[in-house]
Image (cartoon, grey):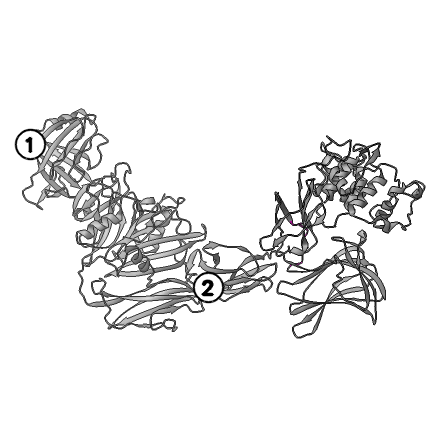
Amino acid sequence: MKPFLRRTTALLLCAALLSTTALASQALGSRIYGYTLDICDNTTLTREVMWSASRSDLRTENYVTYTPSASVSPKVSYGSSVLAKQSVLTMAKDLEKGGDRVLSGINGDYYVMATGNPLGLVVTDGVLRSSASYLSAIGFNADGSAVIGKPDLTLRADFKGYSLKISDINKIRNGDGYFLFTDDFGATTKNTKPGVDVILTPVTESEGQPVSGADGVSLTTSNQLKIGALVSCRVEEVIEATGATAIPEGKFVLSISNTGGDWLQEMARSLQPGDSLDIEIYSADTRWNNVDCAVGAMYWILSGGQVASGLDASTAAPRTAVGVKADGSVIFYTIDGRQSGHSVGATIQMVAQRLKELGCTEAVLLDGGGSTTMVSTYPDYGSSSIVNTPSEGTPRSVTNAIFLVSNLDPTGKAGSLYVTPASLTLLSGATTQCTATALDTGWYPMESLPGEVAWSSAEGAVSDSGLFTAPDKTGTYTVTAAAGGVSGSTKIQVYDTPDAISVTNQGKNVSSLTLTPGQTVDLNASASYRTVGLTGGDTCFTWTADPAIGTITADGKFTAGKTSASGKIKVAAGNYAVTIAVTVNAPAQYTLLSDFEGKDTYFKSSHAKLTPEDSSTYVKYGFQSLRADYTLKEGAAQLTANQALTDTDRYLSLWVYGDQSGNTLTAGFSGQNGETLTQALATLDFSGWKRVTVAVPGDAVSFDGLTLSGSKTAGTLWLDQVVLSNQTGWDNTAPTVSLSVSGTSVTAKLTDNTRNALSKNRVSLTVDGQTVPFSFDPSAGTLTAALSGLSPSLHQITVTAADCCGNLGRDSVTLSSSAPRTPFADMGSHWARDYTGRLNELGIITGVQVGKETYFYPNRSITRGDFALMTARWMGLNLEDYENVTLPYADASSIPSWSRNAVKALYELEIMQGSKAADGKLYANANASITRAEAMTILGRLQAKGYPEAPLSSFSDAVSIPAWAQSHVATLVGLQVVSGSDGKLRPNDTVTRAEVAKMLFTLW
């Protein structure tokens, strides 16, 4: 197994796990979860995760506790020299290569990051590798017991009758006085300034003999630099050094800078090869004479069971410390920091208080921040790995480290079972697989179990295979494994109510969803308590959804409903829940039942006379509506229909022109079992057009028509644009049409904002107003056609599309004339020549005969009579059909005979209405010029209703448009029939004959 996986697995084992309400530490906060592992005799690894209420975040500590015994030994390690930095894990691996089983290790002393120079002393194998006379230290005796204090080392060089102070051993020479170097420092002294260097060879003949120092201090003889020792040396060479001096292996270099004092320099220069020099090292605290290993410590934070005064209480950071309990047991302590959501760290004062809580009476603080690292070897793995989370992401290289190694060998005899759950913190209903590994009596993993494992828990929550299912109640549950006479257990924390739930879709957090009808999403939920993740599964949560938006399964698979809706999905665990806002946006879909164009009345009735209506006032969309002259019989009048419903037909909408009768209009439906279902549409207490909408009953299978009921026994109403839809709104957006013509090939792309809105029967292709055949692919929205039989004149090609709600969209292309007609003598170079030529070709305009020439007089203002005649011919009306129409105009007798029938036709069709004069009479004013606003109003009345109206604000004279003309002007601008000039529409100016010719042509 890879080290990372082993580390992850091992971290999950806990021998002690407290409830969420337990107060773990006055110093650090309330306990969330934790574990303690036995990793050797009387040696445990503990991890605690706590919640800091003041920081609203976690604190995570890891510490090893051991009782000194023959089973374990502390060790101090560093790189190839006391200055060579390495990560704690690298040092651990080096120890393992040397045959040690590393139980745990932490980073050591503070150091100068640029050089690696440790600030305090370093002792390994009883030898002083680096000194510091002013810092505290942690030392370990050969039996594993610890010493904490301030060594205050005295370092002296005795020669020529003097006992002279040595400033430091194996520290960068950065001051005055003597410095002593050994090959533990490196290959050279690394001095950068001139000075005097004396090469010394230790020559002590008898180790361990008692001897008195220069000041009478009791010492022992040694050939190595030990605390409490005197080392006799012989001078080998005196060097006037200009820089770094090589350090011979096994020898010393006594060095002084050329700024280190003249007398001290001369004393060094006075030495001759063969002279004797003794080195004394001692501490007034004789406990340090026996330490086997030690490192310096910047702060002595706990002494005599009391927290030191003046410790930093404001800066939370990663920390490393060592504490000693009253019974002599030792704690290697780390707390991670600077990682929100994992651990914010602790102040120095907090660390001191925490170690006191753990029973320590003495403690020192080691290097922290990015240096804080702990390694350990889990019982089921053969080598060490990092157990904490260094704040820089990767372990920092440090100057030294303290380790605890096992002195035991593998025995091959089963001593216990090491039980690990795949997850330590679970949500009620979740499962986790537990596994068991056999450990021998030396705490080494065995390759096989001593027998078949029997799993048990007091609550019966574990299966025969070790699968634990979290019970319904919050608590700490013990799972035990037994095999071959040995056993082991673990504790698993279960929460029935988390304090946070997150929901994801395809790995991304979601707080809201916008879906289309029928769309399915597989939601996943996860829970946490105090930011600590709880293992669970989708079925550990209760999933509910508002019925309007769709359905959701027990494992979080949500299927959106078939119609537009908004609501919430609720995800709950225990007493905690979150909601996900859901919007189902159904692409609007309308089914047109009838637009009442042509002769089809759609409805049938024996109680009403149903006739098509083409009077503009009573038409909402297109050219026609349905007029219903009804009589109530037995209190009701039926307009029957027989329309099967689909799943998307959720609403019925229609436009009603009310008759102020106060009667009620009701929609009728049939249910699945043939039962009659009704929905009130409107009370007819209004006049004018009004859209009415009702929801289709949920179990309706057909729309059966409309019913009129009430107290008024007869009346007339008008209906237009009856549709079924999947939403309550009404579509007011016109289809878009993009037309292109190449030669005789016509292609148009049609789109609409609603689904399935376009069909061939609501699309037209015209050439100069005459329909021509075409092909239409509704799925692609593509119209194609091949034109034939076109004259060489100018032609207007137009594609028009209507959607189910009556909105109209169109696009036109003008085909240039290949052989322009010039029937008029005054149009040869006029801009309207081609328009007038085509209209003349079709008999719409004729001109005036003067001698042998025909003139059109394009720049003359057109009279109302001429305009009526041109318009009637453009419409293709048979004017003789209107000969008997009686005109209401006071000036009817003055209407020229050649335009009289045209005026009658336009009056009869409600296209031209005349104007009322001051005398109250209605006048045709056939011989008067017509204004542009009047002309646009008349032409606007020729168009089907439903085209979008263009905004007119871009025209500087828009405010001059009469109110009665504004809608028609906006329609013609939207159709690009009128574009104005110089940013003006000039609505109250007269219109010329040429302008009318162009408008009529482009109106096709």
Q: Which mark is residue 275?
A: 1
Give the total number of marks visible in the rendering.
2
Comparing 353 with 641, the one in front is 641
Residue 760 falls in image quadrant: bottom right
Residue lying at the far bottom in this picture: please name it: 673
Mark 2–mark 1 Cα distance, whole angstroms, equals 84 Å
Amino acid at dot 2: Asp
Residue 673 falls in image quadrant: bottom right
Q: Give me the residue at 39% from left, 51% from top.
A: 343
Report which residue position mark 2 lands on.
Answer: 538
Q: Is residue 412 above or below residue 349?
A: below
Q: Is residue 777 magenta?
A: no
Residue 449 falls in image quadrant: bottom left
> Could you say whether the residue bearing mark 1 is in a helix, strand or loop?
loop
Main structural element of the magenta stretch: helix, strand or loop? loop
Single out the mark in the foreground, 2 or 1: 2
Comparing 696 with 332, the one in front is 696
Question: Is residue 653 left or right of 81 when viewed as pictured?
Answer: right
Question: Is residue 735 left or right of 896 when viewed as pictured?
Answer: left
Which residues lie in the magenta part? Answer: 727-735
Point out the tag, 2 or 1, that comes first from the N-terminus. Answer: 1
Q: Residues within 10 Å of mark 2 (few under 14, many from 20)?
A: many
